[in-house]
Image (cartoon, rainbow, N blue to C red):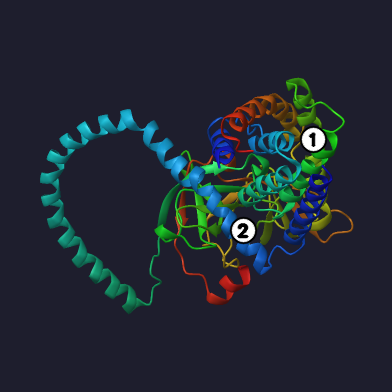
Amino acid sequence: MLAGLVHWWWSAKLAVFGLAPNVIFAAALSAAILARPAKSICLGFFFGLYLDVLGASMFGGYALSYTLMAYGVYLMKRHLDLASPFSQAVAALVLTVVSTLFYHGLALSLAGASPLRLREFLAEPFLNAALAPLVFHVFLRLKRRSGVL
Amino acid sequence: MNREKDLANYAAVFFVFVSLLFVLFPSARIAQTVRILVSYSLYPSLHYGDNYDHFVRNVPQNILGLLKTDQENRALTGRIKELELSLKAAETVREENARLTQALGLAAHSPLRGVWARVVNKNVQDWYGVVFISKGARDGIAPNSTVIGFENGRMGLAGRVFEVYQDFSKVLLITNGVSSVICSGPGAGFEGLAEGRGTWLLKVNYIPEGTAISEGMELVTSPGGLLFPQGLPVGRVQKVHPKESFMNFITADVAPAVAINALKEVLVVKRELPSDLGAAVK
């Protein structure tokens, strides 16, 4: 809910030239890094579903992307250290590109059309990479204080 | 550890299966139910968030407004009395007008009536696809209602209501890739299908070869399209593409009549659609 509120506020009030970081993505990634595997996959699914309800295109597309992303992070974090801000930023950068391509590929194959804006595709990974460590830090504090994750 | 691994695998398989179910069968009852349930998570941001944001933003202006209102209130009280007299006279004229219109068999003038709403959210992932507006079922908004945008005193078709919630609604913009509008040039005697492309431009297809269409021409909603009221500005022709040898129609790029990505307030037109059309659109 909180991530949704921040996502709304940022995209409605702070978007510059129609660009804003995807707060929901950063939240899903942070949850995937911090939470236990099953919970992180579940959270990824629901974060994705939230984005699906916000849009008008393929319902379930983001839910699928973020579920797979959470599973990928679960597999990846056994081999990589994702605790440092730099590694989180790199993971966010790569995973934004991968999940965007996956989502639009899926939309293209199922709906026959997928309006992917080049500007968004080029800028969003960097915006997400900048935001992900911050969201991770907030989630980490939440986890330590309340054990919510 | 193994139990946790198994649990993660089961969770992944389960949620991937559920997501695929939604993707492949978006109209299934279960998908619709989930969509409605998840839509409740939009309430904190789209309804309460926007209301409080609007309230806080307008506090200084509201205080000034209250002082001005008090002064105006005194002045207007006298004016109201004068106008009440004029109103009585106008009502008599209107009744007479209605009688004469009926007697002469003229069509009654039906202006666009609706509800004003603020644009409360744009989806950055779908910038030219959808926006959310601050009015919903509680304010009488119905699915497929026409949404009109305004820019510098000009109005233009912005889209149609796609989903209605209690206190807010989702609007499918004309620039959305799945949106299409039947339009025509005023007095030009042709119709074309303006289709969204997910960008700021529309593409008008199926314009008959040899049609007098030129750059700068204004296109309006056609009487042939029952979904929207006729005569609403759709956009202005930006570029006419020459006919390809394998096609028997020409196409054109059209810039929407209002800047779709800068909508702040919109008018949602309350209008009864023919019942069979409403069912078909659903």
Q: CA distance from mark 2 to mark 1?
A: 26 Å
Work out whether B234 lies above or below A12.
below
| Residue B143 at x, y percent in the picture | 53, 63
Q: Is residue B65 visible?
A: yes
Residue bearing mark 1: A95
Image quarter of the C terminus of chain B: bottom right
Image quarter of the N terminus of chain B: top right
Instruction: Indicate the quadrant where residue B98 lies.
Output: bottom left
Mark 2 secondary-structure assignment: helix
Q: How many marks?
A: 2
Residue B35: mark in rendering:
2
Q: Nearer the viewer, residue B275 or B214?
A: B275
Residue B15 located left or right of residue B160: right
Work out whether B128 lies above or below A137.
below
Mark 1 secondary-structure assignment: helix
Instruction: Indicate the quadrant where residue B181 lies.
Output: bottom right
| Residue B150 at x, y percent in the picture | 48, 44
Q: Nearer the viewer, residue B245 or B54?
A: B54
Chain label for disc 2:
B
| Residue B174 at x, y percent in the picture | 62, 52
